[in-house]
Amino acid sequence: MTDQELRERARAVIPGGMYGHQAAPGAGYPQFMRAGRGARVWDVDGNEYVDLMCSYGPVVLGHRHPAVEAAVAEQARLGDCQNGPGPVVVDLAELLVRTVRHADWAMFAKNGTDATTMCCTIARAQTGRNKILVARGAYHGSAPWCTPRPAGVTPQDRANLGYYRFNDLATAQEAAAEAGNDLAAILVSPFKHDAGFDQELVDPAFARGLRALCDAAGAALILDDVRCGFRLHLGSSWEPVGIDPDLSAWSKAIANGHPLAAVLGNDAFRDGAQRVFVTGSFWFSAVPMAAAVATIGALRDEQAIPAMHRTGIQLRDGILAQARSWDLAVTYTGPPAMPYLTFAGDQDHELAAVFTAQALRGGAYLHPRHNWFVSAAMTGDDLALLLTATDQAFAAVRKHLSD
Ligand code: PMP
């Protein structure tokens, strides 16, 4: 079955043919994927790509990592979705509490949206207050309170949100003052990774300022580590900044592609966490938890995070040298393991689309409007192929500009 044939079948039975973030990101992209191994993926038409999207973040050690898949098979032999969680839930909670500095306890769910929503609910239960501050434009999930699209959302869904600008402490202080004694929490991502925009690392003074604001107000500082968690640091992504949140939301990379989310919290919020009713039919499945224990172990044993950082630096240096050689003005932002590239003046992402479409033809799967993800499986050969594809992609942009 070809991609084209599957698209036609899908159009009849799936609204819009596909939906959400996995709708193909542009012309020339395959919609349907067949397989993945290490840093390579194959579409249903048999094309092979070096994968720089990593399933939008879940894959961190590479596709089908042997130790993770062995743990999955072992747990699957015993059982997955049962009347109670497996013992692995306690192993995993202990491992996370040992690994993440601010965490005294852990709870589990499936998706990042579950985790960010639970953090807000727990903060409200603990503080008895309503208002949550978020950075304008930040993505925290697809539930009505946080989805970026207005369709189907009521004003009431957003009524208890206040807004600040990332890295602009004065705007957070103003929003906190406006919330007054109804401030339950400030929700923040480790760095600014809004899709389609240049990324911005956090200013440590901003992180310290948010911590102080929450402490003064008796509100929760919630870190949305869904996208960054365990890609930048084997612990909370703000540990290197020296700031601990009260609650943190995790998903994506924690189980190397297996469906799992986690909420981690400190003892000050344990009572609120105990009082909320949160659950889901598949939240306690043992297989993804076994995958998470194996993933965290492999991240540590294989020194995967420093490896992604080093590969990310080689990728950045290679791409920036190519951009210079093609005399193209670009901005390359974000941590080396989670980079994003924009072209000067490319407001509607036209040049980004030319660049990524040509890279795709050259065998590199990038994205025109979303940050990229380096996995620990990327080899020197993968990187060389990737950089050959991006060089051709810069050539295509140069040609597009001169046509
Ligand atoms: N927060 C952040 C920072 C994310 O990047 C995402 C997913 N892209 C989410 C929350 C929501 O996660 P999920 O799609 O698994 O619900």
Image (spheres, rainbow, N blue to C red):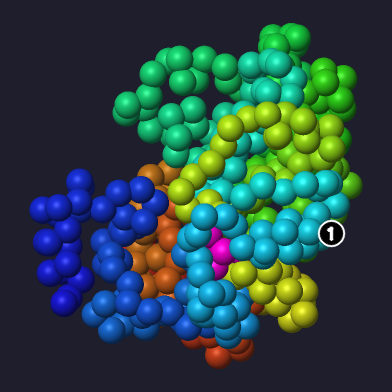
Residue 60 falls within the magenta-colored stretch:
no
Image quadrant holding the C terminus, namely bottom left
Where does the magenta region start and end?
A: 285-289
Q: Magenta span: helix, strand or loop, mainly?
A: helix
Q: Which residue does the numbered mark 1 point to in the structure image?
A: 98
Front residue of 6 and 26: 6
Residue 341 appears in view: no
Residue 372: x, y in percent? Answer: 53, 62
Q: Relative to 161, does residue 345 appear above or below in the rendering?
A: below
Residue 395: x, y in percent? Answer: 41, 73
Q: Relative to 296, does residue 196 appear above or below in the rendering?
A: above
Residue 220: x, y in percent? Answer: 76, 29
Residue 379: x, y in percent? Answer: 60, 86
Image quadrant holding the N terminus, namely bottom left
Q: Amino acid at mark 1?
A: Arg
For the point 72% across and 59% down, the residue is 90
For the point 61% across and 63% down, the residue is 86
For the point 60% across and 36% down, the residue is 118
Q: Relative to 42, does residue 357 appear above or below in the rendering?
A: above
Other residues around mark 1 within 10 Å, as few (<14) / some (14–19) / many (≥20): some
Residue 288 falls within the magenta-colored stretch:
yes
Helix, strand or loop for disc 1: helix
